[in-house]
Image (cartoon, rainbow, N blue to C red):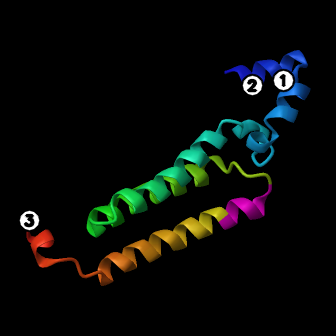
Amino acid sequence: WVYPNRLATGKSHIINTRYRFLFQRFEVSCYFFAPIYLVRNASIALTHAILANHPHLEVLLLAAVVTMSLIVTCWLRPWRGKLPNVLDTGFMLVYVLVIVTAALLSEGERDQINK
């Protein structure tokens, strides 16, 4: 891992200035969370775009992605401060509840359900 080594050698000013948008949101101990965060958001967006014609599979995959992200966020607590961690966890929990409720209320085509 290059980031901790560069911080230890004193070359961190250049890295912190250049890649501030990736590292400034998270705790120093969770510097690696930026790609996880980007993959989470991209997978949520791509799930909606790719599986638009398969609502049951879309709901299942979205619930899995958001639940895994919820577990990782609760475990690592990557955000700087307690309030952002609580808000992110709360919003993801509400999102999972909305997804599951939408799955219960959705009416797919009977042919798709029975296959």
Left/right of residue 70 with respect to residue 23 in the rendered view: left
Whether the magenta-drawn stretch holds residue 62 is answered as no
Q: Which residues are magenta?
A: 81-87
**Residue drawn 55% across and 54% down?**
41
Please tell me in which quadrant of the rendered image residue 4 appears: top right
To which residue does mark 2 refer? 3
Q: Amino acid at mark 3?
A: Lys
Question: Tag 1, which secondary structure?
Answer: helix
Whether the magenta-drawn stretch holds residue 84 is answered as yes
To which residue does mark 3 refer? 115
Which mark sits nearer the N-terminus, 2 or 3? 2
**Residue drawn 61% across and 40% down?**
35
Q: Amino acid at mark 1?
A: Leu
Q: Amino acid at mark 2?
A: Tyr
**Residue drawn 87% across and 15% down?**
9
Question: Tag 2, which secondary structure?
Answer: helix
| Residue 52 locus on image (x, y percent) | 34, 65
Depth order, front residue of 108/66: 108
Please tell me in which quadrant of the rendered image residue 97 appears: bottom left
Left/right of residue 82 with respect to residue 11 in the rendered view: left
Q: Classify 10 Å Cα crowding around label 1: few (below 14), some (14-19), many (20 and above).
A: few
**Residue drawn 76% across and 60% down?**
82
Which mark sits nearer the N-terminus, 1 or 3? 1
| Residue 63 locus on image (x, y percent) | 40, 62
Q: Classify 10 Å Cα crowding around label 3: few (below 14), some (14-19), many (20 and above).
A: few
To which residue does mark 1 refer? 7
Cβ atoms at labels 2 and 1 below 8 Å apart:
yes
